[in-house]
Image: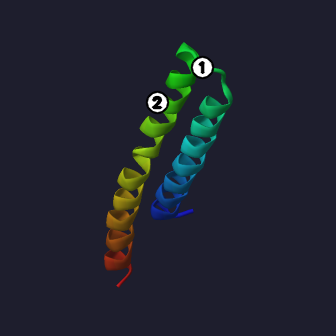
Amino acid sequence: MKLSTLLYTLGFASIVMSAINFVEGKKIPEGERKNDKQHDGNFIGHWAPTFFILAKVVEDREHRTEA
């Protein structure tokens, strides 16, 4: 598996994990733990752009070395 594929997969996985954490936080009754879950979801969601940018950079380098 190429590194770029792995990074794209991690980007999509972080989006899914973010959504799951955020929705789980919504299901928890009002309280301290609810905010923690929602904040975790937001934090994990911010990883996706980084993974996608790194994947694109690595993908461009992989294509340059193949040519």
Above or below: residue 30 compared with residue 15: above
Residue positioned 57% across, 37% down in the render: 22
Query: Vertical placement of 4 versus 22: above or below?
Result: below
Looking at the image, the residue that sits furthest to the top is 32
Q: Quadrant of residue 27?
A: top right
Please provide percent x and percent y for residue 10: 52, 51
Q: Quadrant of the N terminus?
A: bottom right
SS for callout 2: helix
Q: In this view, which residue lies farthest toward the front?
A: 30
Please, is residue 31 above or below residue 59 in the view? above
Q: Position of residue 49 (x, y in %)?
A: 38, 55
Q: Secondary structure at mark 1?
A: loop
Residue carrying label 2: 39
Please tell me in which quadrant of the rendered image residue 64 appears.
Answer: bottom left
Q: Decide: few, some or many residues near mark 2? Use Cα within 10 Å; few <14, some 14-19, many ≥20.
A: some
Residue at the disc numbered 1: 30
Disc number for residue 55: none
Q: Is 65 left, or right, of 23 in this rendering?
A: left
Residue at left offset 35%, top offset 57%: 54
Q: Residues within 10 Å of mark 1 (few under 14, many from 20)?
A: few
Q: Between label 2 and label 1, give the one nearer the viewer.
A: 1
Q: Residue type at mark 2? A: His
Q: Residue at x 36, y 67 (%)?
A: 56
- Near-viewer residue (60 or 25): 25
In this orientation, which residue lies closer to the viewer: 15 or 60? 15
Identify the amino acid type marked 1.
Glu
